[in-house]
Image (spheres, rainbow, N blue to C red):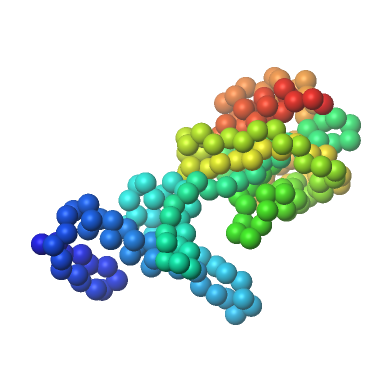
Amino acid sequence: MGTLRAAGVTWNSRVSRGAERALLVSVIIILGLVRLREPEGNLVRAPLRGSILPEELRRGSCVCGGDAFCMCTPSLAIDVVLEQSDGSVLLVRRRDNGKLAVMGGFVEVGESVEDACHREAMEEAKVELTGDLRLLEIFSEPGRDPRRHTVSVAYAARVTGEPHAGDDAQDVVSLTRAQLHTIAPEDFAFDHERIISAYLRSPP
């Protein structure tokens, strides 16, 4: 006999511990990830209290669809190596740890990866992308971001505008291709030295 309590409701059933745990996780996801509609019609996600979730559900993005099917997948992000007209590259210095990073961020619900690139470039570096986005590589190693399993689509793109820090960036740094070769891997945030290496291997 198993006893399951969630949201003030108690169930008693003859279930295995595995089935009881699965049911509890389903209830938590449904209660914690229900989408609330704001007055203007935008969709927002109700906050989750991470402490009540099992470890495996704190490492990605969990959603429940209209068909009541819930699943957890890696978070989707973009990173863009920003090229200036003189051939130099813009990197951002993160405000949280002071390390250098390729400009990027998470793709929002209802947004394409291309649109996310344009939005993040303006939010983080106050520049506009021009021309085509050049795909460099897709980075999906589960441990690349210690906060959660994040898959990043990495691009390179030309930019215009006067760069300056915005959003969560502490500073915007302009570096030549030669200078990029001299930065130590530990000076980069996450695995961004791999993104820069992919960029340096690509045709200029």
Instruction: Identify the residue at horizontal 43%, vertical 55% (top origin).
Output: 71
Asked where in the image residue 14 lies, by quadrant, the reply is bottom left
- Residue 101 coordinates in the image, percent (x, y): 65, 36
Instruction: Identify the residue at horizontal 76%, vertical 37% (top origin).
Output: 134
Q: Nearer the viewer, residue 45 or 22?
A: 22
- Residue 167 coordinates in the image, percent (x, y): 67, 52
Left or right of 1? Residue 195 is: right
**Does 187 sit above or below residue 46?**
above
**Does 150 sit above or below residue 193?**
below
Q: Nearer the viewer, residue 107 or 91?
A: 107
- Residue 44 coordinates in the image, percent (x, y): 55, 67
**Does 92 sit above or below residue 23?**
above
Left or right of 31? Residue 65 is: right
Instruction: Identify the residue at horizontal 42%, vertical 66% (top origin).
Output: 68
Asked where in the image residue 9 lies, by quadrant, the reply is bottom left
Image quadrant for the C terminus? top right
Count of number-bearing discs: 0
Evaluate whether residue 27 shows in this view. Answer: yes
Evaluate whether residue 92 shows in this view. Answer: no
Q: In the current view of this chain or complex, which residue is farthest to the front?
A: 67
Asked where in the image residue 171 lies, by quadrant, the reply is top right
Q: In the current view of this chain or complex, which residue is farthest to the right?
A: 86
Q: In the current view of this chain or complex, which residue is farthest to the left?
A: 1
Image quadrant for the N terminus? bottom left
Left or right of 24? Residue 137 is: right
Q: Nearer the viewer, residue 184 or 35?
A: 35
Instruction: Identify the residue at horizontal 65%, vertical 44% (top origin).
Output: 78
